[in-house]
Amino acid sequence: MGTKTVDEAGIETGAETTNDEDKVNATEAGETAGDTGEKPANEVVAEETAPEETAPEEAAPEGPSGVGQGAGAVVSAGLGVVSLTGSWMGTVAAARETLVGQLQTSSSASVAKQIQAVYGDAWQATALWGGVFALAALLVGVVVLARPAFGAPGRPQAPWIKSAAWAGVALGVVGLLLAVLKYTDVLLGLPSAG
């Protein structure tokens, strides 16, 4: 950055004078180079370093980034795993049913009724909570898989999101099937009292 100074004679000094001299020299060099058809060296450098004018790039279409879908897919898979392995809610519900069965069943009740009240109801409570988690996994997975149909067109869903959502759906279906089989005593039913 030069400053423009003028002395008493009106002569410019400083960086501006140098720049003006460069312009005059470049003009004279351009006139002589124009005769030969060649560009002067300082113009060639200027053209190479000048930014090219390009058409503005089209901005990426605004839309969902996929973070929510990815989170939903992971949640779906997690809920599916919980439906198969059991949850804290299922354990608490089973313990509560066991306690209620012990309190409400008299010692004079039949063995079959005692087994059902103490163990059967707890088993069904565990199965019920497993089914709730399996159903949640299934629904979240289906919503994640169906979301691109209602989103921005032309924005494909990441493959890992699809894989995780399908895993959640599959685990949800298996968990729901097992919960129904446990609840109805088809799978590992209570032993007979007789």
Image (tube, rainbow, N blue to C red):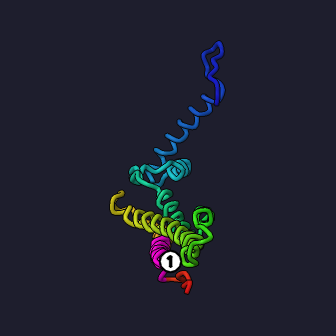
- Determine whether, in the image, residue 89 is placed left or right of residue 152: right
The percent coordinates of residue 157 (x first, y second) are: 43, 66
At horizontal 46% and vertical 73% (from top left) the residue drawn is: 176
Above or below residue 53? Residue 162 is below
The percent coordinates of residue 89 (x first, y second) are: 59, 62
- Which of 46 and 54 lies nearest the eye of the viewer? 54
The percent coordinates of residue 28 (x first, y second) are: 50, 41
- Which of 126 and 51 lies nearest the eye of the viewer? 126
Instruction: Considering the whole magenta stretch, tell me its main secondary structure.
Output: helix
Total numbered badges shown on the rendered structure: 1
Above or below residue 32? Residue 19 is above
> Can residue 159 be seen from the camera position used here?
no
- Which of 160 and 179 lies nearest the eye of the viewer? 179
At horizontal 57% and vertical 37% (from top left) the residue drawn is: 22
Above or below residue 59? Residue 7 is above
- Which amino acid type is shown beneath numbered disc 1? Lys
At horizontal 38% and vertical 51% (from top left) the residue drawn is: 55
Name of the residue lying farthest toward the front: 108
What element does badge 1 sit on?
helix
- Which of 55 and 155 lies nearest the eye of the viewer? 155
The residue wearing badge 1 is 182
The percent coordinates of residue 137 (x first, y second) are: 48, 66
- Which image quadrant: the C terminus? bottom right
Image: magenta residue range = 168-186
